[in-house]
Image: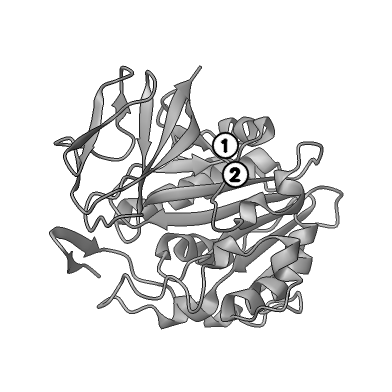
């Protein structure tokens, strides 16, 4: 399926078709759309999770393919999960930007205070159902995609253990180390995933623009590299699925700031795209209402810039420093 969708001045191509996941509804865990396979051999509980957001198709394709390949762990347990299924089932390729979530962002509710609180929503109900399983997971890969065209990135959190795990996976090239978002906690930062002393670890991969065909390929390659790094599946099987082309050396970026627009007239320098590296401190990033916005340090990386539909108060880009 290929559909063109105009969003302001930016054309999007819907090149992916969402798989029918209803066959996986019953699962075997007591929580719908989560299935756990137990090898019977001691080892970690590994999870591959898709559709944290309902309009992110590439993860659903990857998890569906794992089911259809009858992938099983050789040690520990492997859980295959579809998260915000209500939003996913409501997604319409004719209106693809809708149904990211039903009532609130599923990936901003992952704190005990929120999960134990009294607030109600479709997403909170689902997160509370999934919570006992997430509490038991040792290694998590959460598969996402992005609103605007952008090179793939691995989000590893603020801790060194996350950076090390992302390096073990080896794809994508850019590893983004951050502290999360001010408006809520992601699943990859929940519990032991975000604790330095815990052996638990989690990665969130952003595979590219939501519906471009290449996002499916990135999701598939990252999934198998994650499974290989987790040592939970047959090594020869994993290697049979992994592209053997040489990979570029990892680039680790530590996020330092979120730049917020003061005006609707926020214009990045001509030709700006995600993962651009501004070489020198003081070089131009953008103009905001005519005022220059300058790089705060050398090797300043622009992460997920919002290039259209800017409004005052919007976070237009996160910036990070490229580190050795």
Residue 67 appears in the rendering: yes
81 relative to 6 in the view: left or right:
right
The image quadrant that residue 89 belongs to is: bottom left
270 relative to 259 in the view: left or right:
left
291 relative to 29 in the view: left or right:
left
Circle nearer the N terminus (2, 1): 1
The image quadrant that residue 168 belongs to is: top right
At 85% across and 51% down in the image, what residue appears? Answer: 41
Q: Horizontal and vertical percent for residue 147?
A: 33, 57
Q: Secondary structure at mark 1?
A: helix
Q: Nearer the viewer, residue 320 or 17?
A: 320
Q: Horizontal and vertical percent for residue 230?
A: 68, 42
Q: Horizontal and vertical percent for residue 13?
A: 21, 62
At 24% across and 51% down in the image, what residue appears? Answer: 263
Name the residue tied to disc 1: 169
Q: Is residue 215 above or below residue 291?
A: below
Q: Secondary structure at mark 2?
A: helix
* Cα gap from disc 2 to disc 1, whole angstroms: 5 Å
Q: Horizontal and vertical percent for residue 233?
A: 68, 48
2 and 1 marks in contact (CB < 8 Å): yes
The image quadrant that residue 304 belongs to is: top left
Name the residue tied to disc 2: 226
273 relative to 105 in the view: left or right:
left
Mark 1 burial class by Cα count in 10 Å: few <14, some 14-19, many 20+: many
Q: Nearer the viewer, residue 320 or 187?
A: 320
At 32% across and 65% down in the image, what residue appears? Answer: 16
Q: Is residue 103 above or below residue 139?
A: below
């Amino acid at each position: 399926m290929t559909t063109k969708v105009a969003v302001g001045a930016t054309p999007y191509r819907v090149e992916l078709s969402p798989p029918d996941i209803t066959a996986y509804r019953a699962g075997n865990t007591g929580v719908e759309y989560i299935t756990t396979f137990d090898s019977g051999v001691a080892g970690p509980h590994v999870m591959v999770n898709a559709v944290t957001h309902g309009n992110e198709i590439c993860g659903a394709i990857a998890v569906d393919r794992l089911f259809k390949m009858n992938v099983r762990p050789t040690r520990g347990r492997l859980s295959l999960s579809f998260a915000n299924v209500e939003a996913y089932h409501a997604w319409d390729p004719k209106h693809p930007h809708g149904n990211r979530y039903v009532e609130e962002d599923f990936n901003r509710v992952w704190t005990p205070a929120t999960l134990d609180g009294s607030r109600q929503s479709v997403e909170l109900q689902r997160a509370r159902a999934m919570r006992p399983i997430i509490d038991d997971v040792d290694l998590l890969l959460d598969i996402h995609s992005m609103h605007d065209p952008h090179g793939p990135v691995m989000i590893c959190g603020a801790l060194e253990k996350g950076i090390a795990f992302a390096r073990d996976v080896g794809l994508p090239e850019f590893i983004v180390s951050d502290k999360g978002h001010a408006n809520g906690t992601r699943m990859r930062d929940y519990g032991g995933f975000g604790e330095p002393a815990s052996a638990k670890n989690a990665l969130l991969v952003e595979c590219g623009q939501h519906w471009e065909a290449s996002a499916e390929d990135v999701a598939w390659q990252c999934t198998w590299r994650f499974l290989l790094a987790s040592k939970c599946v047959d090594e020869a099987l994993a290697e049979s699925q992994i592209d053997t082309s040489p990979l570029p050396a990892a680039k680790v970026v530590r996020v330092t700031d979120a730049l917020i627009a003061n005006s609707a007239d926020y214009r990045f320098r001509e030709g700006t795209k995600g993962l651009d590296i501004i070489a020198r401190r003081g070089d131009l990033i953008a103009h905001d209402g005519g005022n220059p916005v300058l790089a705060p340090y050398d090797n300043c990386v622009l992460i997920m810039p919002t290039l259209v539909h800017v409004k005052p108060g919007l976070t237009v880009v996160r910036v990070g420093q490229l580190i050795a």
